[in-house]
Image (cartoon, rainbow, N blue to C red):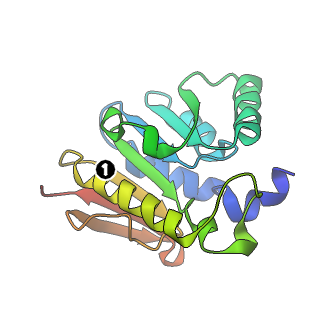
Amino acid sequence: MIQAWSAQHWTPLRVARLTTDFLTSGPPSRILDIGSGAGKFCLAAACFAPQHYFYGIEQRGYILEEARRAQKKIGITNVSFLQGNFTQLDLSRFDHFYFFNSFYENLEEEGRIDHDIEYSAERYRYYVRHLHNGLRSMPIGTRIATYHSLYEEVPLNYDLVDTLEGGNLNFWIKRRS
């Protein structure tokens, strides 16, 4: 079942590579994947950049277990998978962020993984506001990579520095307070 969702919900390897190169261009850092699903981005990125540490946050425990099984099978140690809602995290614990629009399933019923969590447009707006506010308070130099995003979560104090994959992959750097 996890593999069936791959094309719509999990990051393609070429996107993971491009994103990893952007997010890890500086000293060793802590990178958070918001809505990490089965962990494909974190696991690939951890292989591409072993000196950096990757965290994935996912609400669904059964999907997170798949990520942990894959991590154990390939023996990657620079990844941690966290179960829960990203709104419960202190974003200041992380240096950079990857966001493959995990909130969108609240707007589009056909894109939903399951019916285990509550969905609504109001929840989408809440998540976007929460992420936007958290990112706004991050230090100058913070990097964000968004994939298939509507850009609502990116504060105005971040500059768009590159666009790839037909406009679907965007790289942002916080340049001002």
Q: Which quarter shows the C terminus?
A: bottom left
| Residue 64 falls in image quadrant | top right
Give the residue at mark 1. Answer: 134
Above or below, 123 against 151 in this view is above
Q: Which residue is drawn at 56% across and 52% down?
A: 16
Front residue (pair 112, 3): 112
Q: In this view, does 163 lie to the left or right of 71?
A: left
**Residue 80 place in picture, x, y as percent:** 56, 28
Q: In this view, does 28 lie to the left or right of 34?
A: left
**Residue 82 place in picture, x, y as percent:** 57, 32
Q: In this view, does 54 lie to the left or right of 151?
A: right
Above or below, 73 against 118 in this view is above
**Residue 130 place in picture, x, y as percent:** 37, 55
Front residue (pair 77, 36): 36
Q: Residue at x 78, y 59 (%)?
A: 5
Front residue (pair 97, 27): 97
Mark 1 lies on a secondary structure that is helix
| Residue 174 falls in image quadrant | bottom left
Above or below, 70 against 36 in this view is above
Q: Is residue 22 left or right of residue 67?
A: left
Q: Residue at x 39, y 42 (%)?
A: 24
As shown in the figure, which amino acid type bears the numbered disc 1?
A: Gly
**Residue 17 place in picture, x, y as percent:** 54, 51
Residue lying at the far right in this picture: please name it: 1
- Mark 1 closeness class: few <14, some 14–19, many ≥20 residues within 10 Å: some
